[in-house]
Amino acid sequence: MNQPTRLFDFIHFQAEKYPQEKAFNFKKGEEWKSYSTKEAIQIINQVSRGLLKLGVKPGDKIATVVYKNRPEWTFIDAGMNQIGAINIPLYATISPAEYTYILNDAEVILAFVGEGDLYDKVAEAKYNTPSLDKIYTFDQQQGRLFWEDIFSEEGQDEVEAIKSSIDSKSLATIIYTSGTTGHPKGVMLSHDNIVSNTIAIDNYIPCDKGDRILSFLPVCHIFERTANYTFIGKGYNIYYTGMDNLGGEHGDIRTVKPHFFTAVPRLLEKVYEKIYAKGNELTGLKKSLFFWALKLTEDWEYGQKHTGLLGMKWRLAHKLIFSKWREAMGGNVKGIVCGSAPLNPKLAQVFSAAGIPIREGYGLTETSPGLCIAQFNGPGAKLGYIGPAIPGVEVMIDNSEGEYAPGEGEVLAKGPNIMLGYYKKPAETAAVFKEINGETWFKTGDIGRLDDVGLGAPLLKITDRKKELLKTSGGKYVAPAPIENKLKESFLIEQVMIVGDKRKFVTALIVPAKENLQIWAQELGIAFSNVKELMSNDNVRAKFDQIIESVNPHFSHVEQIKKYALVPDEWLPTRNDGTIAELTPTLKLKRRVILEKFAALIDQLYGAE
């Protein structure tokens, strides 16, 4: 096999080129359990044979949902794909009502679920899903069907016959978008959509066969899923876990000591906040050295070399400060690719300068997902930019209606990675494609520009989401993301959302970084009994006034923040109190939800307007 052409080819490609003893790993209790390449293929074939025995046919839909990534998900995925069944991956954090909608829309016949309340949530949806026959669990639970119960040793000839008949252009999966507004749409992706993207990026990952990969972003999301196919094809050892298991002395980052992983900006923000908070807690010379080293990173750029006296300073900073950061990340990280939401350039700068290389990727579920990625090796990386288009993909900027500033416009793309369409939604599908000079381009809904910065190819810079642009009552457009990222550079700000659509001026909802705020207050001798009380303190308000005043000059008059409100509780991807979560499963702001939750507070900011 020269290259995989279908999703289930990747594991067989690994067996042929890079067989591994610890290809797939998952912690059971306190011990890591490993599956070799050979064992994985045996299980995958048992799944395929078992599904056929259950009567599954090519084109049938099977749902999968887990809280934590695990090898069983990968085995089920390959096992169903080998016989032409369609994987419908679901987010673990959505409601039973959303499960009911998706399961019915896709006409799912079987579901495989992980631990926790997932069986109950899917079972609740099953009452209103006529097509759903059985639910299997990945963990043995009394009175419930266990996934290994489907395993069969008979029928491999039929599996091989179906495998050979599956075309790379055929439908492989339907991924339902997170649905922050209205019902989610099912994105139809073919084997070739994802495989082309996977092969295009395989040289972007700075790892060698046998290197350890930590996989914790939801594998139902196309970003992590495509990355996983790449990891399998390159012969890396994947360690599956969840975001809640990463940190601490005994967290999976320290125990696995990964060479590479994918991340989302919110995760890196939280890591940086903890590092900064620990630096703030230091005293005397240690604290001075910490902030001296941090200040060194302010002028750092990709590919920069330091010699002479400056080189000596950097070597000292690495030895005394940055080496501890790297150790907290396991000590072996060769690279991190960040995606799903805009990455603050400051984060990429400070981590990369500290010897934890970070690059940003950009794409959508509809593009499988990669469109542009900054390179680890070579010239294709610059702070503030994503990177050039990946091989086989073309991007262009469309400002044909003159809506945006010169050089800016909607990002359009074409290539083998562009989706087949939205499931059962021809009108919505047609709406996201545009004909230009006889060629069909996909409309991303993102605003950006392509700049020639002297690195061999134009680099993409995303300025905002088209649908997230605010339009003030005066008719002026405001892009919230750049303002939000600039504010989050402050060590006292954890989360922020800019408000101003159809309003006279721009305001901000700010979630303070509680730990840093408490340390700052203690250093100033400010007395407080809780964070809410602290947030109303005159000195605290004066400090946040100062932060706003320092950020505003970076933006035009219409973009500047006139008023703000401090919000005491962190915005989260899940809520146990029955309220709607403020973040998507990939930790992006649900702007509509936040606007509704804080409507009264926002109205106070605007007063009578």
Image (spheres, rainbow, N blue to C red):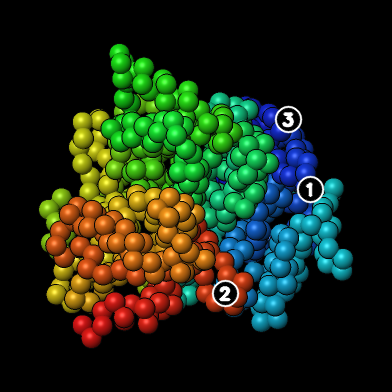
Asked if marks 2 and 1 touch (Cβ < 8 Å), the reply is no
Q: Quadrant of the N terminus?
A: top right
Give the left or right position of residue 164, taking residue 115 as reference: left
Q: Nearer the viewer, mark 2 or mark 1?
A: 1
Amino acid marked by disc 2:
Glu
Residue at 62% across, 71% down: 576
> In this view, which residue lies farthest toward the right?
142
Q: Which residue is mark 1?
A: 29
Q: Secondary structure at mark 1?
A: loop
Asked if marks 1 and 3 touch (Cβ < 8 Å), the reply is no
Tell me the distance, in whole angstroms, between the alpha carbons under discs 2 and 1: 31 Å
Residue 2 shows up from this direction: no
Q: Nearer the viewer, mark 1 or mark 3?
A: 1
Q: Quadrant of the C terminus?
A: bottom left
Tell me the distance, in whole angstroms, between the alpha carbons under discs 3 and 2: 39 Å
Residue at 57% across, 54% down: 218
Residue at 21% across, 31% down: 454
Give the mark nearer the N terminus: 3 vs 2: 3
Q: Which residue is mark 3?
A: 21
As rendered, which of 336 and 435 lies closer to the eye? 336
Give the left or right position of residue 99, taking residue 295 as reference: right
Return the x and y of residue 241 as percentages of the image width and height: 65, 47
The numbered mark at residue 98 is 2
Q: Residues within 10 Å of mark 3 (few under 14, many from 20)?
A: few
Residue at 46% across, 32% down: 286
Give the left or right position of residue 553, taking residue 14 as reference: left
Among the 4 quarters of the image, the one containing residue 562 = bottom left
Return the x and y of residue 21 as percentages of the image width and height: 73, 30
Return the x and y of residue 129 as percentages of the image width and height: 66, 78
Q: Secondary structure at mark 3?
A: loop
